[in-house]
Image (tube, grey):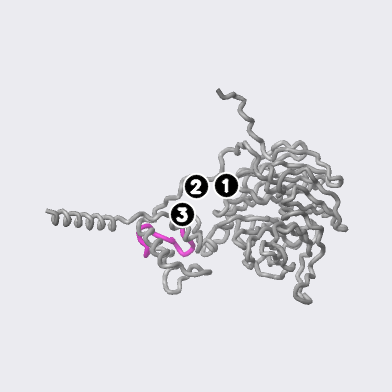
């Protein structure tokens, strides 16, 4: 009897294991397949850079395929270009980096064989809020910018940029976007458009182009699989450059969001970019301590501008001269010419170097020139702003009264005012010559606390 029971249990276990083997667990596109593409493929196949006209960043784009046809056919791994390109002794993809592992290839093949199911959460299909956010606390102000005529002040918020009338500081527009964190705001040279670097950190970086008059979104394109920083417009207004957390800097066409240049010679995050006045070259500044001069048409390295001493956290270009200033994590503020240096006499020399101002306290998070080029402002972890004259590089004033680190600084183009924002979520307007505080206000409209008493 005991032997019969043992045999029955054994047969049941075998039967159960066979059934389990026959029923494979479904492969998750979101958790298992998409991360493979992100690690290995999306550097060349994303909306800003469509090699072979193939986008591998979203499920619908994968199904669409590229110029060589459909990338996959659900249920048939042997049909479609994807597995063909990824497989073999010398696979065609990835072009850069190691081939996919056998485990990764088997996972993709099994997913296709199972019908290429899509389990992308519906919430990810549209992340743009339907209504402006409601704030109970003030968000950190990470970016500020005045329009060229000084009538508007653009301020970073959560999922949005708020446009204020700079005279009475009333809200004129709220520009709602897909990405939650705003890192950089820059008005175009003609003042008609606003470029925004917006991020979903670790997921994507996005450039948004807004029409200032109609406050409508003209174009939005995802340019990286991580955050982007330090936007700058070309003088012609037809391109923008951005620094990226993936250790690259890139140039994009405004009309179609196409990647026109990609510079990959940094070893750390790139926090700043700045075009030369002719628009043919741009400066790429990184936490790896270097400022590189780059060909804006093809992303080719041209020259080093500085001797690498301290990580660079911010960058600004003079409005009318080929000159840039950077701020470092040690509070160093240094100014350089944007110029190639073919006759570098010896290692360690800095032919492009112009001036180093006094060091500010703590890391420098923001530097900015005034629109007339006569002033340079710098601020960071210390709760004060130092303003320097660009004629003799002496300090003009020190602006105090701030609470916490400062991340944003913008000079008014028509007055001697400067707007400042940072950790405490307040906007403060200062008069630069005397360093007087003129106005303090919340960066966003706060919800009023409920007046209903609890019982």
Q: Nearer the viewer, residue 210 or 374?
A: 374
Q: Residue placed at 67% from the left, 61% from the top?
A: 287
| Residue 4 located left or right of residue 98 | left
Above or below, 166 against 218 in this view is above
Q: Name the residue under label 3.
A: 59
**Badge 1 local density, few (<14 within 10 Å), some, or many (20+)?**
some
Q: Mark 2 points at which residue?
A: 125
Q: Where is residue 250 in the image (x, y as percent from the top left)?
A: 63, 61
Q: Where is residue 395 in the image (x, y as percent from the top left)?
A: 85, 53
Secondary structure of residue under mark 2: helix
Q: Residue placed at 54% from the left, 45% from the top?
A: 127
Give the Cα distance between marks 1 and 2. 10 Å
Give the Cα distance between marks 3 and 2. 10 Å
Q: Which residue lies furthest to the left in this view?
A: 1
Q: Earlier in the sequence, mark 1 or mark 2?
A: 2
Q: Decide whether residue 165 is among the magenta residues.
A: no
**Badge 2 local density, few (<14 within 10 Å), some, or many (20+)?**
few
Q: Nearer the viewer, residue 336 or 318?
A: 336
Q: Name the residue under label 1.
A: 178
């Amino acid at each position: 009897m005991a032997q019969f029971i043992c045999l029955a249990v054994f047969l049941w276990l075998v039967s159960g294991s066979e059934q389990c083997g026959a029923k494979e667990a479904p492969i998750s596109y979101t958790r298992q397949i998409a991360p493979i593409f992100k690690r290995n493929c999306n550097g060349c196949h994303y909306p800003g850079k469509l090699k072979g006209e193939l986008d591998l960043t979203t499920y619908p784009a994968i199904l669409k395929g590229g110029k060589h046809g459909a990338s996959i056919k659900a249920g048939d791994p042997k049909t479609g270009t994807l597995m063909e390109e990824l497989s073999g002794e010398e696979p065609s993809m990835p072009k850069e980096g190691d081939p996919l592992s056998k485990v990764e290839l088997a996972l993709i093949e099994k997913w296709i064989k199972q019908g290429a199911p899509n389990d992308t959460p519906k919430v990810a299909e549209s992340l743009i809020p339907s209504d402006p956010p409601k704030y109970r606390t003030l968000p950190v102000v990470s970016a500020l910018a005045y329009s060229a005529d000084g009538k508007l002040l653009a301020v970073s918020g959560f999922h949005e940029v708020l446009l204020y009338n700079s005279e009475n500081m009333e809200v004129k527009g709220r520009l709602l976007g897909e990405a939650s964190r705003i890192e950089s705001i820059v008005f175009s040279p003609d003042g008609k458009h606003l470029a925004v670097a917006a991020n979903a950190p670790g997921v994507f970086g996005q450039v948004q182009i807004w029409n200032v008059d109609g406050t409508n979104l003209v174009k939005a394109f995802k340019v990286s699989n991580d955050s982007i920083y330090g936007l700058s417009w070309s003088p012609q207004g037809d391109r923008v450059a951005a620094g990226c957390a993936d250790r690259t800097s890139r140039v994009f066409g405004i009309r179609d969001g196409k990647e026109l240049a990609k510079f990959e010679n940094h070893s750390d995050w790139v926090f700043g970019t700045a075009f030369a006045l002719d628009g043919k070259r741009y400066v790429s500044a990184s936490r790896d301590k270097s400022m590189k001069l780059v060909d804006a048409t093809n992303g080719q390295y041209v020259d080093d501008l500085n001797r690498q001493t301290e990580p660079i956290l911010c960058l600004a270009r003079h409005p009318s001269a080929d000159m840039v200033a950077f701020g470092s994590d040690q509070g160093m503020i240094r100014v350089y010419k944007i110029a190639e240096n073919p006759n570098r006499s010896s290692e360690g020399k800095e032919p492009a170097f112009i001036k180093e101002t006094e060091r500010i306290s703590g890391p420098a998070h923001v530097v900015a020139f005034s629109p007339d080029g006569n002033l340079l402002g710098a601020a960071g972890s210390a709760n004060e702003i130092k303003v320097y004259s660009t004629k003799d590089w002496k300090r003009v004033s020190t602006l105090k009264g701030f609470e916490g680190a400062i991340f944003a600084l913008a000079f008014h183009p028509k007055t001697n005012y400067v707007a400042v924002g940072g950790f405490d979520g307040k906007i403060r307007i200062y008069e630069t010559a005397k360093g007087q505080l003129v106005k303090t206000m919340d960066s966003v409209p706060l919800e009023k606390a409920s007046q209903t008493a609890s019982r």
